[in-house]
Amino acid sequence: MCGAIASIKLVGRMEILFVALAVSASEVAANDDTILGRLQTVDASVLSTLTLTFERESPAHSMLPDQGTTTMECTMTTSKTAWALECQTTKQTPVIYRAPGTPGFQEIDYVDGNLIIWRLDAFKTLADGSINETYYEHVGTIVAPSGLIVKQGKTAMRSVYNLSDPQNRHEMYRCLWAAGLGFSENLKGEVEQETSKKGVIPVRATGSYGASLHGTWELNVDSDNGHLVRSASFTSERSDKPSIILKTSGTKNFDNVQIAQEGRFEYPMLPHKDETILRFHRFTPNSDENFLTRIREDLKKARANDEVELMDYRDPTGPIRTRNAPIDQR
């Protein structure tokens, strides 16, 4: 994130994107004729408080592309001290039986000749001064070779992080990027751009993706439409192949703010095509405090539920997991 601001205490090095951007807006004003300066100014003016609603379409199973897609309805909101995201499945491709020996499946995926498939059904995330965690609900389906559904069950899991750990915020970044926004905080080094100041401007810069990957971003910035990023790719310094490719399309105008209508992600490092699509419904420049309160309460209830599985990333030796009973034993 941007450098530390002495007059603001960022909770446990949470580096809350929106506070840092709001503070840095005046600092970059003098350099607003550079593409990085313009991106920072746009991000500073838009991202400090917002609420987004959108549809999210992604593979129903991240490692099994032949299992179709899942569509979720999502809401994300930010304030100057917190952000929250919630997605809930609205439709998905029915589970498809695959015989033992099919690539991608192992012996553990079968019980009595029937296939077990787990799919993400919902998740909610919160990061503020006291909470940094995500709650997931998965639905497990046992399907017979005939295609008949033998049994279904649901399991829940909490992923908990140190307050200083940025891993829990990756999905938020991707939501912003899909809207064509929020890239300036990931551009850390020297920025190269073509001299053209109109139309789509190609940009190349060193930067980061996630908590630990460092490398090069290549962007195309639409100077005629709110300096939205129209395409982006990140290549790690340890690879010659992009880790992520993004394309945005369309423009929506809300309260004098422009966002992309749609954003599409691909992950070329995977052995199969994996595409996630976000289609934006609505943007408002305000935090949804009722939404933030509800997500906090939901996560408190999950912490008090002994049946919720825990993946604890706070231990320095690695994540500690407590397991629930397999679906066929419930």
Image (cartoon, helix red, strand yellow):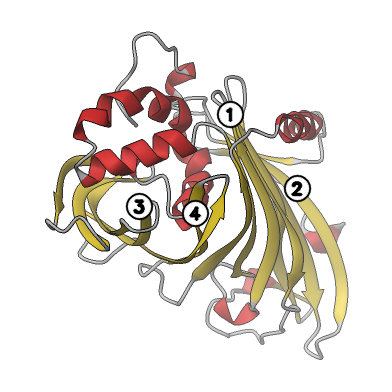
Quadrant containing the N terminus in the rendered view: top left
Residue drawn 52% across the image and 51% down it: 175
Instruction: From the image, state whether disc 1 or disc 4 is nearer to you.
Output: 4
Residue 145, quarter of the rendered image: bottom right
Instruction: Give the amino acid type for the residue marked by disc 3 in the picture.
Output: His
Are circles 3 and 4 on residues that touch, CB within 8 Å? no
State whether residue 159 appears in this view: no
Sooner in the amino-acid sequence: mark 2 or mark 3: 2
Residues marked 1 and 4 touching at CB (< 8 Å): no
Q: Amino acid at mark 4?
A: Ile
Instruction: Residue at 24%, 42% (x, y): give it.
Output: 36
Secondary structure at badge 4 equals: strand
Q: Which residue is mark 1?
A: 79
Residue at far top of view:
7
Viewer-nearest of discs 4 and 2: 4
Q: Which residue is mark 3?
A: 227
Image spot of residue 129 (x, y percent)? 57, 20
Of residue 33 and residue 173, the one placed in the foreground of this image is 33
Q: Earlier in the sequence, mark 2 or mark 1?
A: 1
Verify CB contact (< 8 Å) between mark 4 and mark 2.
no
In this image, 223 relative to 237: left or right? right
Instruction: Provide the residue designation for mark 4.
Output: 259
Which numbered marker is on residue 156? 2
Q: Are marks 1 and 3 in contact (CB under 8 Å)?
A: no
Label 3 element class: loop
SS under mark 1 = loop
Please state the horizontal and vertical placement of residue 56, each as a whole percent of the image.
62, 62
Question: In this rendering, is residue 7 above or below 104?
Answer: above
Q: Is residue 58 above or below residue 166?
A: below
- Could you give the CA–CA distance between mark 2 and mark 3, rounded to whole angstroms? 40 Å
